[in-house]
Amino acid sequence: MTNFVKNILAVYKQAEDHEIKHGKTWYSDALKECQDMADCHKLPLHIVAGVVAALSPTNRWERNLVDAHYMCKTFVEGGYVEDCAPCTYKTMRDKAWSILQSMPHTVEDVAFILKGPKITDFYLCIMGHDVCVIDGHAWCIGFADRRTMQEVPNIGKGLRKQLQEAYSKAGKKHGLTAYQMQATTWVTWKRIHNV
């Protein structure tokens, strides 16, 4: 774990001021986007954020928001899941729709429907919980090992937990949450390696 923290901090040390600012506000900006969408469609914030998280796999952020907006609009207007064609897997489209249909009462209930560790953590980060998303980029940063996403090995439960703890420790050294540290280092890593 010590190496993970050291490697994360080594990337953070290379962050430019605008990258640190962007990393600090990325998830609060995402929450604001979800709140605007919730207000527009008169839906609860935790439901809309769940839809956004469900539609996120393989989906660019800007497109993710467009897809979530369209799905919420379709649902509110009495449409059908088949009317929606988001840029993600059909199973994720159906999962997002099931969140709208079942209208879970709490953040925890939405997280239970999401199930997958990456999208659940993404959802919790948007909702302000101090966790972080461990994806291929986060793995590369933690291991100081530049690979394509296809070359990153499967990240098991134990390793995911170790990396999350490392991001949390690294974040605390700079007064950041785990997700702020992860977002900042991801933006920096992207620039450094042109990915």
Image (spheres, grey):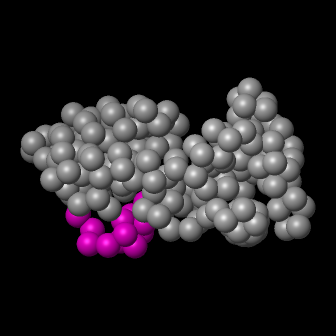
Describe residue 167's horizontal placement relative to residue 51 as left or right.
right
Describe residue 51's horizontal placement relative to residue 147 as left or right.
left
Residue, x 67% and y 65% (percent of image)? 175
Quadrant of the drawing holding the C terminus: top right
* Residue 190 occupies quadrant: top right
Residue 131 vs 31, above or below: the answer is below
Give the overall secondary structure of the magenta segment: helix
| Image: magenta residue range | 102-114
Q: Nearer the viewer, residue 173 or 97?
A: 173
Residue, x 37% and y 69% (percent of image)? 107
Residue 134 vs 36, above or below: the answer is below
Quadrant of the drawing holding the N terminus: bottom right
Residue 68 vs 31, above or below: the answer is above
Residue 124 image offset from top left, x and y in percent? 48, 63
Can you see residue 153?
Answer: no
Residue 181 image offset from top left, x and y in percent? 67, 56
